[in-house]
Image: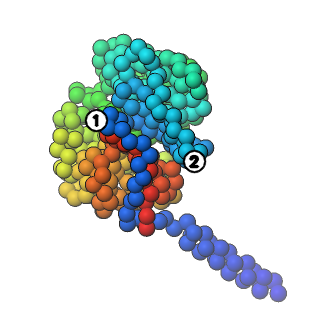
Amino acid sequence: MKQLFVIFLSVSFLFSCNTIEKTLKPKVFNKVEMETILEDTLLNVRAIETLKDADGLVFANSKGDIGILDIASEKIRYPIAVSDSLKLNFRAIAKTKSIFALSIGSPAYMFKIDEDIKKMVYQEDHEKAFYDSMDFWNEKEGIAIGDPTDDCMSIIITRDGGETWNKLSCDALPKAKEGEAAFAASDSNIAIVGDKTWVATGGKSSRILFSPDKGVTWQVYKTPIIQGLETTGMYSVDFYDELHGFAVGGDYTKADANLANKIRTADGGKTWEVVSDGVGPGYRSCVQYVPNSKAKQLVAIGFKGIDYSTDAGNNWSHLSDEGFYTLRFVNDSTAYAAGAGRISKLTFKE
């Protein structure tokens, strides 16, 4: 009787595992359907962030406005003017309990928005100030990165929920190489998993800056992505977990060129390899892993269209010619994309 009971448990366990495996098997997409959520010929959006508690997103545009699209409740708040006197161009946004918007150019301004209260929490007047991307580790701690003003990348960090931001000294950061900067193309130059942070640089030198401890210490890793010109390098990086990451870019002035513009790591960014070299998408401004895809599925997006990989970037299928600048997933089949003139909801279909 005891033997029969053990056999029964073993069979039940195997059946349960097989059932779970089938249930969790990633979907494979063959097409993407698009629903325009907001359309305006003057709209230019490179910074979006999905709402964690609802179906929707926040975004910032090149005219200095932010918007909140709560799709579930069909509420649209746009435009929300952050300042009546300053000429702002937002390329980075983050959402905690508050919304943070960061402008490019000099002076650089960071605003914190809580309901109808808009407060400037950081200003940098250096003539070379140019911030590209922003993200948060948690409700209290966040990071933004920008082009060098001295001999290192500009990195500002908050530890108090965004009330104050402090710029790291170049003594605490790897030295920048000549012509090394970053691109404010899609607000996806920073990837965070737990306490670990990866920052993608670009231009004449395109490398990964890595911090294992929320920006306290930093290392630098080389990449084989195309570089050497001001317009080349990584434009976007994403990490699925602490080991598996992917970056895309190229040269936006040669948008069809697809040599050495897609790279992958499986060791936390220490080493990278070129994949799909000379085939697949050319220049793309944003890449994101599909959630729950075991680091296998990727979507890359740019003004030349939308591309999709099921094998960690080795092969790609072109899903659409519709152009966008940036993309964020809500779940494993729904994402939001933004670009010139519109914000759309994308539904990926098997």
Distance CA(mark 2)–CA(mark 1): 37 Å
Which of 258 and 33 lies nearest the eye of the viewer?
A: 33
Which of 21 and 269 lies nearest the eye of the viewer?
A: 21
Image position, residue 110 (x, y; %):
45, 21
Relative to 271, say whether 319 is above or below: below
The N terminus is located in which quarter? bottom right
Residue at 29% over, 29% down: 181
Which of 65 and 39 lies nearest the eye of the viewer?
A: 39
The C terminus is located in which quarter? bottom left
Would you name the residue on which mark 2 appears?
72
Relative to 1, say whether 304 is above or below: above
- Asked if marks 2 and 1 touch (Cβ < 8 Å), the reply is no
Query: How many numbered marks have been drawn onto this rendered protein structure?
Result: 2
Relative to 92, say whether 306 is above or below: below
Amino acid at the residue labelled 1: Gly
Image position, residue 83 (x, y; %):
45, 18
Would you name the residue on which mark 1 appears?
202
Query: How many residues crowd mark 2 within 10 Å: few (<14), some (14–19), many (20+)?
Result: few
Tell me which corner region of the image, top left, top right, bottom left or bottom right, holds residue 312. bottom left
Q: Is residue 174 visible?
A: no
Residue at 17% over, 44% down: 254
Amino acid at the residue labelled 2: Ala
Farthest right residue in view: 1
Say which element carries label 2: loop
Image position, residue 153 (x, y; %):
35, 25
Which of 39 and 62 lies nearest the eye of the viewer?
A: 39
